[in-house]
Amino acid sequence: MTDLLIVTAVDAEARAIGQHDDVLTVVSGVGRTNAAAATTEQILKYRERAPFDAVLSVGVAGALPGSDLSIGDIIIASACIYTEEGIVTSRGFAGMNGLGFPLGDFEGNAVPVDEDLLDRLGAAFPIGPIATVATCSGTDAAAQTVAQRTGAIAEAMEGAAVVHAARRLHVPAIEVRAISNTTGDRKNQRWDLEAGLNAIRAAMPRVIDLLGAGTST
């Protein structure tokens, strides 16, 4: 595998990834719409002359309650889970299965990651489901809701959209995150964005090597 597309939300994440042979890193902007649009745009742009072998959603994330994750940890998504899509009834929230409509060619709210990419990266890094949220968890109740609703160990704002967009265009994809903060009540959250970015900086040469792409420059 040689040609990789890496999608980040912000410039700081892209700078942490650095420049590597056979790797194109693009900054999509924050959130699902930006992420899906940028992923689709780049895959279609390069499809004829230099198609991508894989797409990675890379960036920082918040650890959810019960995850036992520490700031600076790198995690690989075993699935990327849309958190809000579904229906709220008098009995509580139900995902897309409860609503009765599919989001794609997969079950419920969990976008599958590519199994080969997961095998390669999961041999070197911890894996677990990662939630994709539209609203970050700034209260204990909100963080618990995301964790219970999705079973995820961390939350971010783009992964499911990147992997979903790539899946629609038949390109293998996966999400890679570095923990930069805890979730829950905002006043009690612990943040170290630089530690998260440094974790990305340290991990990406290994990630890229495991996927068979080029050397860093």
Image (cartoon, helix red, strand yellow):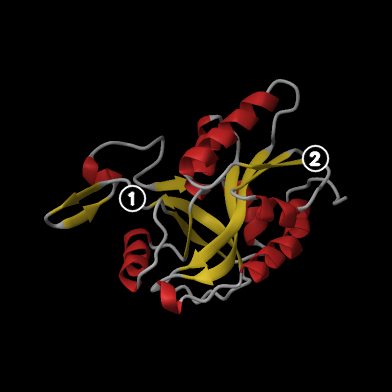
Q: Which comes sooner in the sequence, label 1 or label 2?
A: 2
Whether residue 179 is visible to the viewer of this picture, yes or no, is yes
Q: Residue at x 62, y 70 (%)?
A: 73
Residue closer to the observer: 133 or 126: 133
* Number of the label disc, if any, that sits on residue 68: none
Whether residue 207 is visible to the viewer of this picture, yes or no, is no
Nearer the observer: mark 1 or 2; the answer is: 1
Q: Residue at x 62, y 60 (%)?
A: 122
Q: Residue furthest left?
A: 90
- For the N terminus, which image quadrant? top right
What element does badge 2 sit on? Answer: loop
Q: Is residue 27 above or below residue 141?
A: above
The amino acid sitting under disc 1 is Glu
Q: Residue at x 33, y 50 (%)?
A: 84
Mark 2 neighbour class, 10 Å CA radius: few under 14, some 14 to 19, many 20 or more = some
Measuring from the top left, give residue 71's x and y in whole percent. Answer: 59, 74
Please indicate whether residue 194 sits to the left or right of residue 90 in the image.
right
What element does badge 1 sit on? Answer: loop
Q: Is residue 41 above or below residue 54?
A: above
Q: How many marks?
A: 2
Measuring from the top left, give residue 31's x and y in whole percent. Answer: 49, 46
Q: CA distance from mark 1 to mark 2?
A: 35 Å
Mark 1 neighbour class, 10 Å CA radius: few under 14, some 14 to 19, many 20 or more = many
Measuring from the top left, give residue 212's x and y in whole percent. Answer: 78, 47
Please indicate whether residue 22 sits to the left or right of residue 116 in the image.
right
Measuring from the top left, give residue 96's x and y in whole percent. Answer: 29, 44
Q: Residue furthest front?
A: 187
Name the quadrant containing residue 38: top right
Residue at image mark 2: 22
The amino acid sitting under disc 2 is Asp
Residue at image mark 1: 84
Residue closer to the observer: 195 or 177: 195
